[in-house]
Amino acid sequence: KNEVEQSPQNLTAQEGEFITINCSYSVGISALHWLQQHPGGGIVSLFMLSSGKKKHGRLIATINIQEKHSSLHITASHPRDSAVYICAVLTGGSNTGNQFYFGTGTSLTVIP
Amino acid sequence: NAGVTQTPKFRVLKTGQSMTLLCAQDMNHEYMYWYRQDPGMGLRLIHYSVGEGTTAKGEVPDGYNVSRLKKQNFLLGLESAAPSQTSVYFCASSRGWTAVPYFGPGTRLTVT
């Protein structure tokens, strides 16, 4: 049983295309993270969401708490966007009894 | 600022050997985490700490021990390594449970 499901697992796009990666979760959450893992292995946080929508450059993240769903959009995709994108949810809100759940990631390849 | 650093970057152990992975952060973060990443399974939380002198179990704590004697350091120990502990280990830190996490570069451990 996976608390976090991502789709698609793999995605290949032409440079310039609009990309959407989806994340559905089955637990009550206090926050949701989108992470980016580059081919070299390093992981960076792109967004943290608890409601609504956030935008940073060409990246947009949205979350619908009622539907337990989040999307990550990349506009005007570029080869440097090629990476694995990971959705992670946090349950709880206090110092104890909390959990992180991670999706298995979406591997994105952007072709020039 | 070095951010989050991990030592060592690579290690090969024989079954039954012990080792300690060191994580250090220079951002004065209260929260620190140890994850393992395995193909097809995503990141899984091993142990975490909400402050100096505290530790707590995550999703997959068996076979590991941790210590947080200093705020900036979080050590992960394997007392008797097993092949099932072959993985890439990531350390992360954050200001709080729902704050942006900063990840270290990872340690690739192979147990033969």
Image (spheres, grey):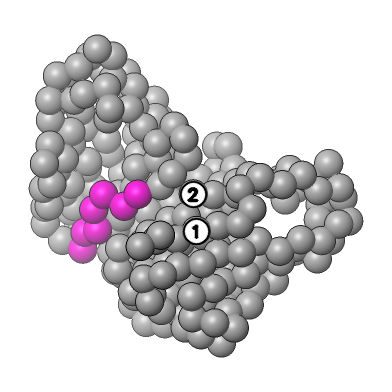
Viewer-proximal residue among A7 and A60: A60
User: Toward which corner of the image does residue A101 lie, by quadrant?
Assistant: bottom left
For marks 1 and 2, the one nearer the N-term is 1
A69 is higher (above) or lower (below) than A100 = above
In the image, what residue occupies the spot 32% across and 18% down?
Answer: A12
Query: Mark 1 sits on what residue?
Result: B5
Disc 1 crowd rating (10 Å Cα; few below 14, some 14-19, many 20+) is many
- Horizontally, residue A64 falls left or right of residue B78, namely left
Q: Where residue B13 appears, x then y in whole percent?
A: 81, 48
Most prominent secondary structure in the magenta stretch? strand
Q: Where residue B84 appears, x then y in whole percent?
A: 75, 48
User: Toward which corner of the image does residue A94 lie, by quadrant?
Assistant: bottom left
Q: Chain of mark 2?
A: B
User: Toward which corner of the image does residue B68 lie, by quadrant?
Assistant: bottom right
Which image quadrant: the N terminus of chain B? bottom left
State yes or no: discs 1 and 2 in contact (Cβ < 8 Å): yes
Q: Where residue A50 appears, x then y in whole percent?
A: 21, 63
B106 is higher (above) or lower (below) than B55 = above
Magenta span = A44-50
> Could you say which disc has been placed on residue A67 in the image?
none
For label 2, the SS is loop
In the image, what residue occupies the spot 55% across and 37% down?
Answer: B40
Viewer-proximal residue among A11 and A47: A47
